[in-house]
Image (cartoon, rainbow, N blue to C red):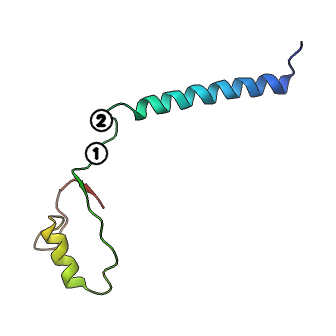
Amino acid sequence: MRVTQPARFAIRRTGVVTWLLLIWVSVALIPGAAAQPDRVVAIGDIHGAVGQFRLLLETAGLTDSSQRWTTVKCVG
């Protein structure tokens, strides 16, 4: 049985995609491969409550008293 050129290309492409997917999954499963934040902070709409929002950021340790970002590791 003779394999046509387009079929050979499709087989080769499928093999390459399969190997790349296996490598990607393997790397994703390595513990510590992706940097993990210390915590996750989620804040909704503030609707004009800027003062309370600033207090919330400061209380959470995300900003200092001068409204500058701190060096806390988190995802927001």
Q: Compared with residue 50, is residue 39 higher up or lower down, i.e. above or below?
A: above
Q: Amino acid at mark 1?
A: Gln
Q: Compared with residue 6, is residue 75 higher up or lower down, i.e. above or below?
A: below
* Circle 2 residues within 10 Å: few <14, some 14–19, many ≥20: few
Q: Residue at x 55, y 31 (%)?
A: 21
The residue labelled by disc 2 is 32
Residue 63 point in image, percent of width and height? 17, 68
Q: Residue at x 24, y 83 (%)?
A: 50
Q: Quadrant of the N terminus?
A: top right
Q: Secondary structure at mark 1?
A: loop
Residue 57 point in image, percent of width and height? 19, 71
The residue sitting at the bottom extreme is 48
Residue 36 point in image, percent of width and height? 28, 45
**In which quarter of the view is residue 66 placed?**
bottom left
Residue 8 point in image, percent of width and height? 79, 22
Q: How many labels sit on residues?
A: 2
* Circle 1 residues within 10 Å: few <14, some 14–19, many ≥20: few
In the displayed structure image, the side of residue 42 where residue 62 appears, left or right:
left
Q: Amino acid at mark 2?
A: Gly
Q: Quadrant of the C terminus?
A: bottom left
Q: Residue at x 85, y 18 (%)?
A: 3
As measured in the structure, the alpha-carbon distance from the residue carrying label 2 to the one carrying label 1 is: 7 Å
Marks 2/1 in contact by CB < 8 Å: the verdict is yes
Q: Secondary structure at mark 2?
A: loop
**In which quarter of the view is residue 16 placed?**
top right
Number of the label disc, if any, that sits on residue 60: none
The residue labelled by disc 1 is 36
